[in-house]
Image (cartoon, coloured by chain):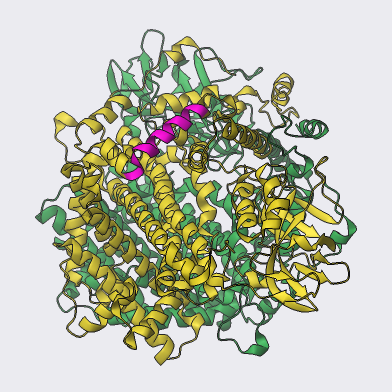
Chain colours: A yellow, B green
Amino acid sequence: MSTIPQWVKNLKPAGPQGTELLQQERNKSSVDVEQLSNFLFTKDGLARKQRVLEILQNDKVFDKSQNYFAGRVDRFETALARAKKLRQLHIKHNFSQDDKMVANELISEPGPYGLHESMFLITLRDQGTPEQHEVFLRKAEQYKFIGCYAQTELGHGSNVRGLETTATWNSDDKTFTIHSPTLTSSKWWIGSLGRTANHAVVMAQLIVDGKPMGPHPFVVQIRDMESHQPLENIHVGDIGPKFGYNTMDNGYLLFNKVKVPHISMLARFSSVDPKTGKYARPASPSLVYGTLTWVRSTIVMQAGGVLARGVTIATRYCAVRRQFQDRDAPEWQKGENQVMNYTTVQVRLLPLLATTFALHFTGKAMMALYAASQSKMSQDAGKAGGPQRGAGPEETNAGSDLLADLHATSCGLKSLASYTAVEGLEICRRACGGHGYSSFSGIGPWYADYLPTATWEGDNYMLTQQVARYLLKTARSVLKGVDPNTNDTTLILSTFLARQDTGAAFDVLGNDSDIVAAFAWRASFLTFEALKHRDEQKKPWNSLLVDFYRLSRAHSQYMIVKNFYETLQSSSPAQEGMGTETLDIMHKLFRLYALHTLEQEASEFYTSSAVTVRQIQLARANAVMKLLEEIRPHAVRLADAWAFPDWQLDSSLGRYDGKVYEDMFYRASEQNPLNRVTIDPYPDSPTLFKANEAAALKSRL
Amino acid sequence: MSTIPQWVKNLKPAGPQGTELLQQERNKSSVDVEQLSNFLFTKDGLARKQRVLEILQNDKVFDKSQNYFAGRVDRFETALARAKKLRQLHIKHNFSQDDKMVANELISEPGPYGLHESMFLITLRDQGTPEQHEVFLRKAEQYKFIGCYAQTELGHGSNVRGLETTATWNSDDKTFTIHSPTLTSSKWWIGSLGRTANHAVVMAQLIVDGKPMGPHPFVVQIRDMESHQPLENIHVGDIGPKFGYNTMDNGYLLFNKVKVPHISMLARFSSVDPKTGKYARPASPSLVYGTLTWVRSTIVMQAGGVLARGVTIATRYCAVRRQFQDRDAPEWQKGENQVMNYTTVQVRLLPLLATTFALHFTGKAMMALYAASQSKMSQDAGKAGGPQRGAGPEETNAGSDLLADLHATSCGLKSLASYTAVEGLEICRRACGGHGYSSFSGIGPWYADYLPTATWEGDNYMLTQQVARYLLKTARSVLKGVDPNTNDTTLILSTFLARQDTGAAFDVLGNDSDIVAAFAWRASFLTFEALKHRDEQKKPWNSLLVDFYRLSRAHSQYMIVKNFYETLQSSSPAQEGMGTETLDIMHKLFRLYALHTLEQEASEFYTSSAVTVRQIQLARANAVMKLLEEIRPHAVRLADAWAFPDWQLDSSLGRYDGKVYEDMFYRASEQNPLNRVTIDPYPDSPTLFKANEAAALKSRL
C-alpha cells in the first residue's frame, strides 16, 4: 500500500476539530440519550447488541475495511465466508433468534444463507406436514439441505396467478413433473439460489387431470449434494449484478420435465391423495393474513431504523462540516458556519429525524395489535398459516373485521414507510454535499441495498389498491350503518359522516389531538370521494388508481400521526423512565412530523376543508420554521439515541467522534487498492498498468 | 462460461413477444419519428452520431459487455484503454469537437482524460498568457502534459474563498511556494488526478508580502514524466470508490512547501510583477459570466437527454411488460395487461416524457440567448474569461442587465434541471418494477454516474440563493420604476405590479398563453413576498433560504414553461419540417408538463391567486388524466424520437426490438463471471470456491 510520508502524517484538519464540534452539540442539549435509547430498544435489547457486537468485532472475517472496494465476485466470496462463520458462532454461542437478528443488523449486508434462514425454513415449517418436517425440515435445520423460495419468474412478479411453471400430477407413478414451458417461466430474483442452494421451494401451477389448481409449493433438489453441480435437466445460475444486494446470489432456475415424488408437494393446507389422485382444497386463505401482516409491520418498524442510519450520519456530518459565513453574522464571528445551521439543511434533515421515531412507534404499535389479534385469528381460522407472497391473499375477503383492518393498514403502511425510508436516505446523502457521493459516507451502499424493499412483499403502488379496496368496502358498510366501533377505520369514517355537514374546525396549530383528527378527516374525505367516483359515477377501476394511491398515502399518514401521538400520550414513556425534558422534545418532533406532512400535502387538506388555507400558510411560515429552530440544538443527541455503533454505520461522515476528515483520508490513502497501481498515462503507449503493479494486483485474488 | 443446454436454447418468452408489442405500439401512433428527431438534433447531428457509432462499434476496446460486471480496478483499466484509443481515433479520423462529444455520449462513461480535455485545457487557454500557451498549452494539447483542475478541497466545496492551499510569492528567487497547511486543505474530488495526471492547475490563495490576494490558478507538475511517480514533497492518490463515476480517478493532492517558478501562475487576468513583486488586480469578474452561463445552459439542455435515456428504457419496457388483468376488462380479453396501460404508470412516465422535451428546448433557447449576448458581453468586459468554478462570480454584480438576467436564470435552471433529471431517472427505474433493480436495466448505473451533476457547477441548493438575490434586486429596481423592457424578469414583475390589485383570472385550462402567464404571476408573487420579508420585515437571510429555494424553483418552472411554449409557437417546427400531427402531440406534451407541474405545486398557485382551487381540482381530475390518455398511444414513438442506439443505452429493458427477456437471460447466463465459480455451501467446511474455479477466476486479471 502507498506509504504515507511523515509530513502528511503530521497534518491535522483546520480547527475547530470535529470532535470539539460534536462535543459542543452534545453539551448544549438536555435530551437524555440513555433514557430515549432504552425507550426505543429496552435495556436488554441494547445489552444484547453490545454482546453480539463484541463477538463479531473479534473475528477478522467480519472486518469491513474492504467492503467498499471489492468487486462482485470478491464480495460474494467474503459474504459466503461470513455466512458460514456466523452459523458456526450461532452454535458456539448458542444464539437466540434475537441474537441472530442483531448480528445480521450489525453485519449489515445480505448473505448467501439469507433466504434459507428465512423463507425456506419458514415455508417448510408452516406448510409442511409432520412427515415432511422429518424428511425436509430436519436436514434444512442442520444446513444439509440449503434452500431458497422460488416464486417470482422472469415474466411474472406480483401477479402470482400468472406464474407459468407447472407441476403436473402423474397418477401412474405417483409423481409430479416440474416444467418450465417458456423462457419467461424461468424463476428469477430468487435469493440464495444463484450459487448457494441445493434445494428450492418452487411455486408452480399444480395440474391434476389436466385441470389447473393454482400455484402450490414443491420442495425440489436442484444441485448434487457432493459436487454441488446442477442436477440433470435443471439449469440454474446467478442473475448478475444489481444496483445493490450484490453480496446475495439472486438466481434463475429452469426445469426440463423434472419428476419429483409425491412427498415433494408441501401438503399441510392442500394436497393430492396419492391413491385416488383427488385434490383437496386449501383451507381459508385468511389464515395467511397473520404472517403477511407481521412481515409488513416489521418492515414499517425497520424503516425507522433504516432511515435513522442516514439521519445519524448526515446529522453528525452537518454539525462538523462548515461552509460559508452567515450573511447577517456580525464581523467578530465571521468564521464558517456549521452546515446544520442553514435552514435549507434543517428543513431537509429534521423532519426526517422526526420521521424515524414516527415509523418506529407505528411499527411497534402495529406488531402489538397483531399479537393481540393472534388468539382471535386462530379462533377464526385455525392455526396461523404460512406466508404466500404476492397478491394472492390480498385478493380474498377478511377473516375478521379486526384482522382485515390490520391487514389493509399494514399494506398501506408498508408502502409509505419503505418509500419514506428510501427517499429519506437519498435526501440524507445529498445533505452531505459532495462527500455524500463517496462510498465512505456509508449512505449510498446502504440505500442501494435497502431499495428493493419498496418492491418486495408487494409493490408499493400495487399495494395501495388493497388499501383503497378495503376503505371503499368499509365506507359502504358505514353508509349501511355498521357499528362505528367495529375498528378504527369504521370509527373515523362514521365520525366524518356525522360531522360532514357541520364541517371541521380543527385547531392544528394549537392542539395536538386536533392534528390527529385533521389527518383522519382528510383520509375519510378522500375515501368517500373515491367511493363516489366508483359507485355513483361508475368510473373504471384503472382510471382511479392515482386517486387510490393518494388515498392510501393519506390513510397511512393518519395512522403514523395517530400512533406517534398515542405513544407519547400513553403512560409507557414515563413508566420506562423518560424524563419530561426528553418527552417534551419528542412532542415537538411529533408536531414537526405532522405539520411538515400537512404542509407537504397542503392541497388535500384544504380541499377536504380539514384546515383553512390560512392555517397552512401559518404552519409553513411560522410553526414549522419555529420547530426547526427549537429542535436544532438537540439534533445530534436525538440521533445518538438510535445507538448505532460506528462499526455498524461503517461511515467516515457519521463517526461518533467526529473525526470525519481523518477517516476519509485514511480510507482513501491506506485502504484503496487502486492506489497500488501506477499507470502509463500517454495515449500513444500501449502499456496501461506498469507490469510489476499488475502482478501485485493479481496477487489480491 | 456456463454452457447452455439445447432445451434451454429452445425456449421462447410467453407470447405476445416483445417485438410484436412494440410493433403494435409504433403502428398505432401518427408521430413522425424522423421529423421529430431532426427537429431535436438536426439531420447533420444524427448523421454524425451514426458515423461515430460505427467507428466505435468496430473497435473491441469499446465493447460494453463486461461493464456491469467488472470491479473498480478492472473498470478503471478498461476506461484508460478506451481513453487512449479514443485519442488515437481522434487523430486518425481527424475528429471535430462535436465528433468527440458525440463519441463520449455514445461511450457513456467518464474517462481518465475527462478533466484534462475539459477544465485543464480550457483553463490554460483562457487564463494563460501567450508565453504560457507556449510553455504549457502546446504540450497539453499533445498529451505530453496530462492535467486536471485542482480546486475543491477535503474541507471546502462551493466556498472557493475558504480554500486553504497557499501560494506564497518569494521575491528573492522569483518563485511561489505551494503549500498545504492542514489535512482539510488536501485537494479532493479532483477528476483525472488520482492516477492519471502529471500536471495540475492548482487553485491556491496567493500571498504577496504577507497579504492574501484570494484564490489564483497555478500550473504545477505533480508526477515524473518517465516513472509517473509523484514528485518529492507531493502526496497524491485516488480518493476511493463512489456511488458512481468509478471509471474516473477522482484524486487527492497535498503539497509540502513545493517551489514553482514565476511562470506557473496563470497571468492573463492577474499577475505578480517578477521585478517589482507588485500584484496587478484582476479584470472585472463579470467577464467569467459567459463561460459559467454557457456551462449551466449545457447542463440544462443535456438534462433533457439524460432523462430521456431513462424514459426511453422505461417506456419501451412498460409496453412489453404485462402484469395482472384490467378488473373492468370483459372476459374475452382477460389476458395480462401491458403495464403502460395502468394510470399509476402513465402518471409517472408521461409527464417525464414531456419534461425531456421541455428541458431540451429550454437549454437550446438559453444557449441561443447566450450566443446573442456574446458580442454585447465583450463590449462590456473585454474578451470572455475562463471559468472560475464556485461561488466567486455569483457574488459580484451584473456586467449588464441582460447578462445578469441570463446568468441568474441559468443558476436556477441548472438547479431545477439536474434535480429533475436525477429524480426522474429514479422514477423511471422504479417504474420498471423488480427488473429496474438489475444493472441490465441500464438505468441504475447511468443514474449513479449522473448524480454529481446536482452538486457540481454550484450546489443545487446554494445556487437558488443567487437567483433569489437577483430577483429581489430586480424587484427593487422595478419598484423604483425601471423600464419594464430591460429584460424578461423586469417585464413579468412590472406586469404583476400593474395587475396586482385588479387580480389575475388566467384560463389555464383553456388557453396555453394563460398557462405561461400564470407561471409568471406565481413567480412574481413569490418574489415580492420574499422582498417584503427581507426589506420590510427585516427577516434574517438564513431564515429565508427555504423561501428562496421555492422562489427559484417557481421562476425556473416559469422559464421552462415559457421556452417550451415559445418553441412550439415559433415558425421553426414548421420550417424544419415538423407536420401538424406531430406538432399537435407536442402541444399536448406542453400542456401535460405545465398542468402536471401546476398540480404538483398547487398551493403556491392558489395562494398567489394565479388560479382558483377549483381550477386546480379540474386540472388534476380532468385535464391531466385526459392528456395521459391522449398521449399514451404515442409514448413509444415519442421516446424513439430521442434516437438512442441500443449500443448507447446498453439496456436489456430498453431494447428497440423489445427482446427484453432474451437479453436479460443471455447476459445473466452467458456473460456473468459469478457463474464461473462453484461453491462449497456447507457451513462446517472451510472451502468457499472449488479450487479449480478460483484458479479460473484469477486468470481474469
Does the image show residue A44? yes
Q: Which residues are magenta?
A: A40-55
The relative height of residue A231 versus residue A398 in the rendered view (above or below) is: above
Q: Position of residue A509 (x, y in %)?
A: 16, 62
Front residue of A277 and A56: A277
Residue B238 figure quarter: top right
Q: Give the residue displayed 78% in from the left and 45% down from the top.
A: B59
Q: Give the residue displayed 20% in from the left and 85% down from the top.
A: A501
On-image quarter of the C terminus of chain B: top right
Q: Position of residue A42 (x, y in %)?
A: 34, 41
The relative height of residue A530 versus residue B483 in the rendered view (above or below) is: below
Provide the major secondary structure of the magenta segment: helix
Q: Is residue B110 left or right of residue B599?
A: right
Front residue of B489 and A7: A7
Q: Is residue A299 left or right of residue A671?
A: left
Q: Give the residue displayed 17% in from the left and 83% down from the top.
A: A502
Does the image show residue A430? no
Q: Is residue B38 magenta?
A: no
Residue B387 figure quarter: top left
Q: Is residue A46 magenta?
A: yes
Q: Is residue A621 left or right of residue B593?
A: left
Q: Is residue B598 left or right of residue B336?
A: left
Residue B23 figure quarter: bottom right
Q: Position of residue A77 (x, y in %)?
A: 67, 35
Q: Position of residue B447 (x, y in %)?
A: 54, 52
Front residue of A471 and A334: A471
On-image quarter of the N terminus of chain B: top right
